[in-house]
Amino acid sequence: MLAKPPRWRSHSTIYPCCATRDTQRENITSTNTESPFATRERERERHRLNQERYRARQKKRITDLEDDVRRLANEIENLKFELHGVPIGVTSKQTVWNVATEYFRLFQYGLSAGALHGYALSFLQKTMSPDVTDGLEYGPESLLENWRLISLLFDGIDVRLHQLVEVGEKSVVATTTTSITISKHTVLRVFPHLDSDGTGGADVVRWSPLSVKLRSRAITLRGSVRFDWDNKCERVIGIYSQSDLLTPLLSLLGDLDCVARVLDGALVTSEFRISMKARF
């Protein structure tokens, strides 16, 4: 009689320990499985967060580089003055005319914290009274601080003297044009209310439409500066400047409501006076 063939046995019967591992793997896999849609959404959100952090870092690097470029440009202008041997003080008899002329020659390109700072302070102390005023602050140091702030907040400063006219017996009025560039740094520092979070921080992800219109634009302001003179001490006792910021902004933005939104909360007035809040 023929022997019966052996009954077929499953893999799990022969290797029960393997069956246990397979079952465990299936359970773990089924537990950790998520829908393809959920996986895509999770990956998309992680990618979005990574992109935002990357853009914030890049914008901070760009802002830092722009600050470095601005400082270097100011240093170059200062070195030009030193190269050509600018004399300290007014060399001839001190009058309101030559003081005003030297003032505009000195501050034509603004002021940085570099080589020209010492000469500028010496000039102001020699030609201005100790309590000279610009209508808001007093003393030569305050005048210099105002120029320092303007130079830090705006790029491409170029102040041109067009005419000096005598007014009364003790004053002269200068007619000027001032060219400036509104850089990204300017928008962040002077118009902080125009960025996405209204803080003026460097990590701006989104810019408002108004800030986009302002960035990297060069404008020219027409203005005047009045020098009041004291014949007894032969020094300037008052220096009052104003420049029309409203007109070029209106030309740039095309709407008075937009101009009002730009200036409302800005650290500069419509007469191009730096706010006390900007004094850092």
Image (cartoon, rainbow, N blue to C red):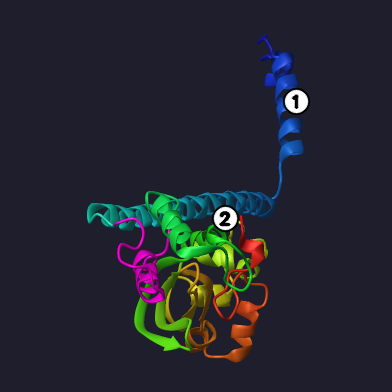
Q: How far across and down, in percent of the image, does residue 239 sit?
A: 52, 74
- 88 sits left or right of 19 in the view: left
Question: Is 66 positioned to the left or the right of 12 in the image?
Answer: left
Residue extending furthest toward the left: 84
- Amino acid residing under circle 2: Ala
Q: Residue tagged by mark 1? A: 24
* Residue 155 location, quadrant: bottom left
Question: Would you place residue 140 above or below residue 227 in this image?
Answer: above
Residue 67 located within the stretch drawn in magenta: no
Task: Report whether residue 8 is seen.
Answer: no
In the figure, is residue 55 to the left or right of 263?
left
**Viewer-nearest residue: 195 or 49:** 195
At x 61%, y 64%, the residue is 138
Please, which residue is most extreme toward the front here?
Answer: 232
Local crowd size for mark 1, using a 10 Å CA cut-off: few (<14), some (14–19), many (≥20): few
Query: Which one is closest to the eye, mark 1 or mark 2?
Result: 2
In percent of width and height, residue 135 lies at 61, 74
Who's the residue at 22% across and 56% down the image?
84
267 vs 223: above or below: above
